[in-house]
Amino acid sequence: MVMNTATVGAAVTPAVIETFLTHYLNRKPLAQKPTAHISYDEGIHLIRKFLIYASHHTVEEIQRFTSQWVPHPHWVKVDELKIPEEYTTKAAQAVQEQLGHHGIEKVGGKIWWQWRRPGSELAAEWIEMRADYQERKRTKNPGTRVMLYVHGGAYFFGSVDEHRYQLQRHARKLKARVFARIKDLSLSCTKLIQAARYRLAPQFPFPCGLHDCLAAYLYLLTVQDPSHIILAGDSAGGGMVVSMMVILRDRGIPLPAGAILISPWCDLTHSFPSVAGDNPLDYVPPYGFQQKPSASWPPPNSDDMLAIEEGLIQSLSHNDQSKHHQSEADAVQGFHADTHPNFGTQNANAASRTNGNVPTANTIPGSGRDLSIMIDGKLVEIKDQIQMYASNHLISHPLVSPILQSSLGGLPPLLIQTGGGEMLRDEQIYLAHKAANPTKYPPGDVFLDESPHNHNRNQVNRWKPTDVQLQVWDDLCHVAPTLSFTRPAKYMYRSIAQFGAWALARAQKTEIEILDDDDVSVISMSDSEEDDANAEKEKSDDAGYKAVGKAGDALPPFKDHMIRERVDRHGIVRPLEPESELPGCSLPPSEIGVIKEGPVKKWMSAKREWDTRYASAKRRVQKQRARELAQGYQQFGAGEVPPPSALAGRRKTGADLREGKKERSWGMSLWSLWGSKHDQDAIKLEQEADKAPETTLASAEDGAGARPLHDTKTNQGKLLDKGKKPSYSRSRSRRRAVTDQNQTENQDEVDEKTPAADLLAMRNEKPGQPSDNYLATEFAANSTNPAIFLKVPTNEEYDLKRPKADGIAFPFSIAGHNASASMTTLTSEVGVPPTKDVRTREVMESGVSVNSADIHAAAETGSFSEEAKVMRENEKPADGTLVSEKGKGKENSVPMSSVDSEKVFENGQVVGAERPPLETFVTASSNFPTSSTIA
């Protein structure tokens, strides 16, 4: 059945009627929930029903429906513009530099993703309230409030037209102009709002959309100062905004004044607990997005490609039913379950790629092999692509899943709004804490070590914490502002305007005048349920509980770079629970970015249903692909391998790939008018009011505790910029950090998140200050506010058998307590004492010299054997010096009195003060160097 306004209306109308009846006939289960409001209850059920209906249509059909032309209200001014090609070229260069050689290879090249349909230039829209435009024109003001908005839609559907009613609300609240891209993304800007139309997956997978959004921002920088710009995005658009800012930060491109992330989708691996649980208050399908098969989705998997190469599908295309007769079930190839996997097979984690000799399933995306996971004793191998935006091996790429970035520090201030009832809440809460405390939430070792040339471990400590306001809204759904006509959405728009006004005022170092629209707010004046009004008033009177702020209200102070709030449906704010009580923040790094059993089981169940139901359609698509492959596709050149879903890799010679003409959507128009009704009524009340609405001022002085906007790098990051080797980087260690939690409220520039390397650099910048006795040995006398390192107890037997040099253990151990001449020489010449003297008489009589550290370390520990004591006494000359057998002379002597003063302690062990570099290690068969040659 075709997908249009009539068919969609017929599909959703029964759900609307049913919701209306059950809402009033069975109100008790809805109490104390957002669904207590009929408008919210109707809205969430309507979206849920639409997504279910749309899943039984092709990707192309839902894209066509959601991108239809929607007229804008007469009180809104919309201007479309084309982004010049020079900015797409600059954006492509920035993306290539960010990807690096390794990333370009994984993406499949650096050219194919720059290709566009003929006649489809990158476009964007300016969206602004007409009254604000006329005022700007009269005062000749170019505008100092711009929001670049990136719309959501799981990266594969949605448009500026679909989101315009939300964008105009942002423009009115912030008295701003919104800039939106016109292909697949929408970008909104205050005073002026820009929405961008970026290319959509799966025909244009990663990094196509990111490339387009970045180009829109680079163009915007030519007409607006970065301090005038705020980035904003919802769902997939929110994740895209985070990746944009990381590229801007790393490439040295001016960052905006701030960013607003509404339910950002930032983990495409679905590795957080909330995705696996039940989420009855959300409308997002729990199994992901399944669509009827088409030329665009699903793309051929590895088995399909192998069949094509072997000519099996080509024979099917000739209708040779006698040779290859397939049943409907034979087309189900989305996954394969091995009921007899290797004994002991375990799921891998991100702590390490290896697990000894234990067989592991490939649960970590990025290896190039098919994903696999152990479920109920079976090894499930995932064949089909899971997410439309990226191939399975790319869903863990840090530009695809920003939660796997080495660091999210050094970004402009962020507002993150999360629905407490949405499926993706855990990853959004984690994102906020990771940005505010980068060193506490690094990715797993597998992801840090994936691209060694990027020095990811150094990046963890390179950037200062980002200031974040996190709001978790009780029981709300994914991207609740979509339901702009509801009471909870009203409060969310207020918070967005409050944060946006503060961020702009702070970046511009001035005060910003904002409309106080309480007197004309339709929802504020509407006749809602009496119990809601009473509950709101009662809660606001409670100690410590305040109503959510609006534009012009002072932003609360930041504590440890965060404003952590939980907000109920009445807009009442209370403190968010501690990190230890939040499931998203309690997940170890080794489990983040790793596919999990719960989400995979949901996906498998839906995949089996869709593939069985549409098996014949899938087989028709396979035949068509075989015919096209036989005819041949246009190529981009050597090294360019577009993903199977990419339209760039399926260009047939002579085919017309231009987009069809847009038609008007009456259904989308009605949805937009419903969403715009609040703004229309508010504007009407403004015009009828006896006086102009009051205005308030947003000040840069609000939000105390935030770091300076452009002070983004730590001292270690500054050293890296100068090409100097950092003195500290995150590595696998058996040490834990015990840090000052700022209980004394010391407001110094040093806090509990300052790495020891930064303390060292600060000490060097402030000569003459007293040294600190509380730092670990390697950072002693170099700090003012220390991080204290405690050694975790280790295996004593391991330390007995494995020698160390300069705190680094050699990659071998001594079997039992037997020592060879070469082992004794190695430890003796380097000056690293064993815990006890294990040499035999034969070794002592071998002629190998003794280092002073050996004698004094053994003397300190009392670990001389009786036999060794006698032998050492015979080696000691009368003048009190230790003499090497290979060079008896003054230059090779070490006075006993000097040894005591040169002792050095590391990790509780005595080591020699004089150590040769590692390359001077020798074996028993070598010519041993003397003390003079070592020096």
Image: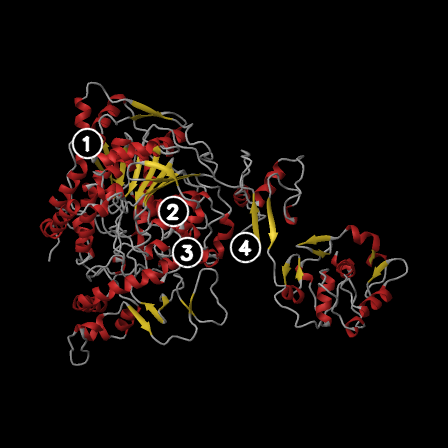
Left-right relation of 758 to 45: right
Single out the mark in the foreground, 2 or 1: 1
Image coordinates of residue 175 in percent, x first then y, are: 27, 29
Q: State how far apart marks 3 and 4 are (Cα).
A: 18 Å
The three-letter code of the residue at mark 1 reads: Ser
Q: State the residue lying farthest toward the right.
A: 878
Residue 331 sits in which quadrant? Answer: bottom left
Of residues 48 and 515, which is closer to you in this image? 48
Query: Residue shown at 31%/41% (left/top)?
Result: 216
Above/below status of 412 relative to 444: above
Left-right relation of 637 to 811: left
Of residues 572 and 759, which is closer to you in this image? 572
For marks 2 and 1 on the same chain, the one whose residue lies earlier in the sequence: 2
For marks 1 and 3 on the same chain, the one whose residue lies earlier in the sequence: 1
- Is label 2 in contact with label 1 (beta carbons under 8 Å)? no
Single out the mark in the foreground, 1 or 3: 1
Q: State how far apart marks 2 and 3 are (Cα).
A: 13 Å
- Is label 3 in contact with label 4 (beta carbons under 8 Å)? no
Which mark, by number, is residue 592? 3
Above/below status of 82 relative to 364: above
Which mark, by number, is residue 429? 2
Residue at which label 4 appears: 731
- Quadrant where the image shows the N terminus: bottom left
Please, what secondary structure does the residue beneath circle 3 have?
A: loop
Residue at which label 1 appears: 526
Left-right relation of 48 to 553: left
The three-letter code of the residue at mark 2 reads: Ile
Q: State how far apart marks 1 and 4 are (Cα).
A: 58 Å
Single out the mark in the foreground, 3 or 4: 3
